[in-house]
Image (cartoon, rainbow, N blue to C red):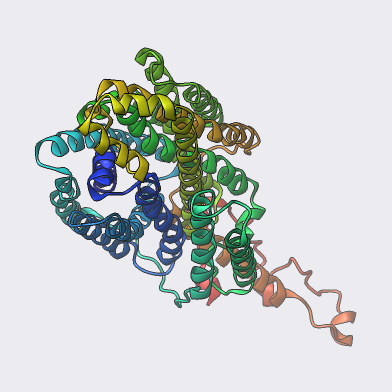
Amino acid sequence: MFVSMLASTVVSTSLPVIISELGGGQSSFTWVVTATLLTTAISTPIWGKLADLFPRKLLFQLAIAIFVLATAAAGFSQSPEVLIAFRAVQGLGAGGLAAMSQVIMADIISPRERGRYMGLFGAVMAVATIGGPLLGGVITDAWGWRWNFFIALPFAVAALILVQRTLRLPDRARQKVTIDYVGIVLLSAAVSLLLIWITLAGGSFEWWSMPTLLMLTGVAVSTTGFVIVELRSREPLIPLSLFRDRTFTLAVLASIATGISMFGSAVYLSQYMQLARGATPTEAGFMTIPMIGGLLLASIGIGQLISRFGHWKPYLVGGAVSLAAGTALLSTIEYDTPFVLVSVYMFLLGAGVGTTMQNLVLIVQNTADPAKIGVSSSGVTFFRSLGGTIGVSVMGAALATTVTDALTQRRAELAAAIAELGESGAEIASGLQAGTLPQVSALPPVVQVIVEDAYAQGIAHAFAIAIPFAVLSIVAILFLPNVPLGRMTTGQKLAAGEADLATVSVDEAMQQLGEPVDTPSSSASTDRPSPSGPPLGGSETTSPPPQTGRDRTPDTGSAS
């Protein structure tokens, strides 16, 4: 997970520089992020399903390899399109890391103890998220942005060696493998068309137009087909029966809001620091520390409290409130908002994300069928990634529209400021007209103030879009069933379930064997044993009542 987070966050502060050097605009900036989130969202349930069918350790190592090789290849990109393509492959590996890490943890750690480990996951994410932007800013300023993509390689080698030498997972019964290929294609088509429409509508074509009609029709047809296929498939990619579980359904709704806030803040806060406050990449990394501090403290602290006392609901409700408050306050920021206030807003948002993100998966794992722990865990992660992906796309579209409108409204003022610059102003004017992201810190002060104000308005508007989803998260968590955390790992639950099945089947079989045959002689007999009596005229000693829970063990002798 550290490899995954580092490779993602180390690029965040340098993305404005990368897109500017490669000649891309706000749409390219959004798609560099969205491509990874899209393939992560699509591949997460696929990895989760594979985790229930194939060796999990091998899948985990494969995910690490795919992620890091794609990340390294992205460092050689010569255009925004090539970068977007490699970032999409990177997302395939990221989906595996997100799904497999949760499934493997459920294999070896009970839900009651898992709270503190979720806190450690949050701490690793926080360290990577703090160190990544800082390191990325330093690397970009010192050696160039391409080295940001190579920095994860030594950590990946260490991770692969560590996993190979130390990870020991319990043996699982081999199953017949059936992969829902049609479901994979339909899900990919539905999500991809939706995101392409959100990104391009209002720019490349009108919101109400023929391309909009065609794309939304494709989304509807693909989604309907996906539901039909999942209902009929022997091994569905996302079993729709999961939604009968209230805990799973409400956790999914809450995760969508968490994903929007988490990914949206990671992308647009860095952009706010550089484009609305004129910070360099290194400075932008330092300026996002308050948010990461909130995430770090909440993730570790709340994880420890959940494991110690076994209660989770009050903490998650408080985290959802903090998430909503931080999102709402960030929708009010301007280019000259005192940084102390911005820091408080970021801290609240980070604390909310740190409290809810991992613990929502924990709540689902606590009540999930142990045979479906893979699809249950990855299902929550999938909808969190899907919510984040759609959220980033919508926020990016709103940001681009708002910035364009703000610059248009101040066109006369901007033209006068550029005219005062003489020949150097012509180059600035051509860049703004082309829609490429400017390096605000390098602009003349008279132009810089206008551009900063426009981007501040756009980013504030983007955060306003996330407010209703944050409120939805509070409601969903309030209605989550308050089920105490168990003390059995997934492997122990499976063993206990097999023992229960063996005990029940033996009892039923013995009762049936003890049933008298309905014949005249037996009817006349006064010595006929009752159905609950000793079977086959055996010992008169009554058998003890069947045990329950983890103390049950299969009576193999009786079964024979």
From this view, report whether residue 248 is shown above or below residue 412. below
Front residue (pair 405, 333):
405
Taking 73 as reference, is 327 left or right?
right
Residue 190: tell me if it is visible.
yes
Image check: 223 left or right of 363? right
Query: Which residue does the image show at 59% across and 39% down from the upper left?
Result: 483
Residue 399 percent across, percent down from the top left: 46, 37
Is residue 307 visible in the rendered image? The answer is no
User: Could you tell me residue 170's position as x and y percent?
Assistant: 34, 60
Q: Give the farthest residue toward the left.
A: 143
| Count of all numbered marks drawn on residues in the image | 0
In the rendered image, which quarter is residue 50 located in?
Answer: bottom left
Residue depicted at x 29% and y 54%: 80
Q: Residue at 49% across / 71% down in the picture?
A: 185
User: Picture quarter containing residue 160?
Assistant: bottom left
Q: Is residue 63 above or below residue 134?
A: below
Q: Which residue is nearer to you in this view: 439 or 364?
A: 439
- Residue 172, given in percent of the width and then of the height, sits at 39, 66
Picture layout, residue 378 above or below residue 416: below
Q: Nearer the viewer, residue 347 or 331?
A: 331
Q: Position of residue 403 (x, y in %)?
A: 45, 34
Is 242 on the left-hand or right-hand side of 290?
Answer: right
Using residue 64 as the reference point, say whether residue 551 is left or right of it: right
Corner quadrant of residue 547: bottom right
